[in-house]
Image: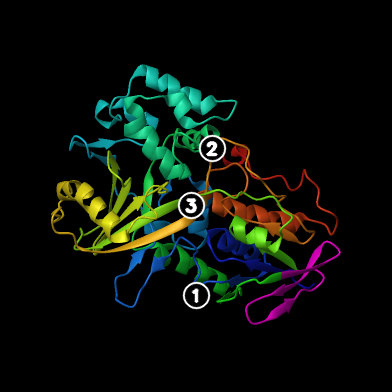
Amino acid sequence: MTTRRTHIVGAGIAGLSAALTVTADGGEAIVYEAAPQPGGRCRTLQPADGFVHDNGTHVLFTANGHALDLLKAIGARDRWFEPEPKGLPLYDGKTGEMRRVGLSPWSWLLPSRRPHGLTLPDLARILRLLLAAKDCPVASIIGDRPIMDSLIEPLTVAVLNTPPAQASSQRLACALRRLIRPGAGRLLVARNGLSEDLIEPALATLAARGATVHTGQRLRRLLTGQERVIGLALTDRTVMLGPDDRVILALPPYEVERLLPALPVPTSFEPILNVHYRMKGLSGPRFIGFTGTLAQWALVRPSHVSVTVSAADAVVDLNAADVAARIWRDIAPALRRLGLDADGDRQPESRVVKEKRATIRQAAEDLPQPPLRPLMNLALAGDWLGSLPATIESAVMAGEHAASLLRHARCTRPTVPRDRPLKTEDAA
């Protein structure tokens, strides 16, 4: 029997997840990526000047079961570890105070691990957030309370990349419900880097299964006929599909809109800005959060410090050098507390990486959503689909879901029940 071939367009996390799912079942996968390298936003940058760093401070939680299962499948689970087992160091830029905060509510049983200002009324508001039947902005539930600054605001922008005044309470609640489970709130980072500890093992696994990955191949046009994809017009070639071939578009919404303009897709986005400071770090990775500063997070590695500003609409268009200088002055005292040689008046070499459309804007509103199988042999994958937070976990789930849709699909017109988008209950 001839093995069905799946053509996957996009080699970010969703595309690699789809390819791993297809090949795990004995299928054949061919992946096409427009960029020179796979990984999408989850990759290590290796410029000519030798300053090697990840493009951002991507993390996982032990609650992210699908992502952790993917790491196990590619033999990389032990490469992700918990840098702050005693609680996340959280530096308050307004007071200069540093304290460790537990990311799981169970850890708040210890007074020393509670977020600053947490009270019983705050717990009631958090419970309302977890159980909200109707979507609304996160800020409308929590209100102007100390817990907003010390926990909810940094958590909201980390998970949803959207300010609490607009962010979807239901999407945030989805993530919080998973963190409540005992042992689920441990924060994990890649020991060496995103490419070495995630992308390269995934590519090696795919190669061992006979899959191929073609970089520098942008999908210019879908060739369609009789509600099917019949060909892929790529950068320098046209691939004609066999009668049983399938296609997964693991692309951002604006690329899906370009290829399939009749489909409804989200059109509002939020940027992320990362600054990487080239300096001597510590022997092992550390992770620290900030409040009262422009940046929210920093990942300290032996040769550099990577700092993230999520929901960065206010600063993404500013002069990069000015932003890097401002952030350095903000975070230098916190880095000194960790043991680094960091002087606010002596900024190290830096590189600013701006992603103006890092994620969709995950606001408390009905976002346009396309059918997940818009053509008989084509499915969509991406962290922007459905109502889950746009994270590595949702990208992995979307890739798995797209492969499953096509595996069980018959050559008939797509139906709504089979092709429903991923919802919060799928992540429960």
Measured from the top left, where is residue 45 in percent x and y?
Answer: 38, 68
Is any atom of residue 352 visible in this view? yes
Measured from the top left, where is residue 228 in percent x and y?
Answer: 81, 64
Label 1, residues with CA under 10 Å away: few <14, some 14-19, many ≥20: few
- Dots 1 and 3: beta carbons under 8 Å? no
Q: Residue at x 83, y 61 (%)?
A: 227
Residue type indicated by callout 1: Pro
Q: Residue at x 59, y 62 (%)?
A: 15
* 305 to the left or right of 392: left
Q: Which mark is residue 171?
A: 2
Measured from the top left, where is residue 23 in percent x and y?
Answer: 63, 66
Q: Which mark is residue 36?
A: 1
- Image position of 235 with respect to 394: above or below: below
Viewer-proximal residue among 89 and 85:
89
Q: Quadrant of the C terminus?
A: top right
- Image position of 378 with respect to 51: above or below: above
Instruction: State the image quarter where residue 305 is shown.
Output: bottom left
Q: Which mark is residue 68?
A: 3
Q: Residue at x 40, y 49 (%)?
A: 312
As for residue 92 lying within the magenta part, the answer is: no
* 312 to the left or right of 248: left
Residue type indicated by callout 3: Leu
Magenta stretch in the rendered image: 222-244
